[in-house]
Image (spheres, rainbow, N blue to C red):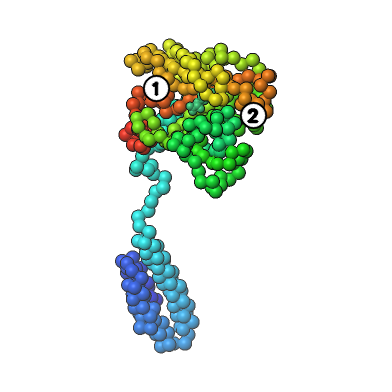
Amino acid sequence: MESDLQQILADVEEALPAIESKAQFEQYKATVVGPNGKFTAATKTIGKLPPAERPGAGKLINEYKTRLQARFDEALRRLDSAELAAKVGPPVDVTLPSPDHGPGGAHLVSQVREEICSILRKIGFVVADGPEAETEYFCFDALNTPKDHPARDLHDTYYIHPETRFGNVSRKGGERFLLRTHTSSVQIRTMLEQPPPLRIIAPGRCFRRDTADATHSANFHQIEALYVDKGVTVRDLKADLDYLFRSLLGPDAETRFRPHYFSYTEPSFEVDFRSAHLGKVGSEWMEIMGCGMVDPAVFAEVGYDPEVWTGYAFGLGIERIAMTLYGIDDIRYLYQNDFRFLRQFA
Ligand code: DAH
């Protein structure tokens, strides 16, 4: 009998690996341990043995039954996992590098923003922040901008529906939300929160209702600077701007002030620069930013004593600087997300 059982086990061991589906498996298993199976038939011969041999034979049958069951279980596990693998597809190695792109790089506007901020950090400025959805108070009123100033016009500024809520953005004064037209609003927010002296820069996104062309974009970026202390003069402003432009453009960069008007500074200036370093473009004066000495009316609005405190402020467009530095002749390139363009600066 033992040789029969051995033969059955050997047959099973040989047959199972070739089986490829559960249906095939069940069919085959029935030919071994089903009611008409080979193994079932072998177990039935036990009744024909002399009584003395039956216990030994029973033990043997049990032993082979266990061994067969183990083979069947193993085959079933293999078929189950093959079935699952067929469902989920080929294995994915998540540690392989992406086939699409290499590691990313900072956008040119971000790079230039960081460069300007790091130059200004060296002379003591710290970064301050303010919301892009502002109120008229911070964007205009507190900056001494007259009620009828054209900048407030619907043609120039994006206003937001009055029922829109923006978390807990404070709405001191002005009730209408708008998308800030400049970062100068951060001057007011910072001064209302901190006592003088202070020295802050506020980089960020601004919005104007401009039709996009080579030099205008409805969405652009500025860096605002505000320095408040005792005895600050135009000399400090000029010296710090010279330092900024020399650091950015090289030691031969020059700046020039032209009188201008901004409601929050008095006197106010527009700044031109030039730099032989920039070749042909650099040999002509280029208008680059606005600045001035903080108007006493602004200090009074935020509760700083204008008899004690003095300060300068300036605001510059990041895109303008990036375009000058890299010879880009159309601001729209910066926003088209064309990798062929952006990759050059990454
Ligand atoms: N806010 C002005 C603009 O968007 C730039 C500016 C001018 C900022 C003079 C200032 C300043 O801080 O003092 O055109």
Examine the rendered structure and indicate whether residue 69 appears above or below residue 58: above
Check residue 325 in the rendering and tell me which mark sits there, or answer none: 1
Residue displayed at 46% across by 76% down: 62
Residue nearest the observer in this picture, 10 or 85: 85
Q: Quadrant of residue 9?
A: bottom left
User: From the viewer's perspective, is 244 left or right of 29?
Assistant: right
Q: Quadrant of the N terminus?
A: bottom left
Q: Residues within 10 Å of mark 2 (few under 14, many from 20)?
A: some
Give x and y (percent) for residue 149: 51, 31
Q: Secondary structure at mark 1?
A: helix
Give x and y (percent) for residue 226: 57, 24
Disc 1 CB within 8 Å of nearest ligand 1 atom: no
Cα–Cα span, label 1 and label 2: 38 Å
Q: Secondary structure at mark 2?
A: helix
Give x and y (percent) for residue 337: 36, 37
User: From the viewer's perspective, is 323 left or right of 258?
Assistant: left
Nearest-to-viewer mark from 1 and 2: 2
Residue displayed at 39% across by 22% down: 325
Q: Quadrant of residue 201?
A: top right
Give the residue at mark 2: 301
Q: Quadrant of the C terminus?
A: top left
Examine the rendered structure and indicate whether residue 339 appears above or below residue 8: above
Q: Quadrant of residue 95?
A: top left
Amino acid residing under circle 1: Leu
Examine the rendered structure and indicate whether residue 325 appears above or below residue 57: above
Residue nearest the observer in this picture, 338 or 254: 254
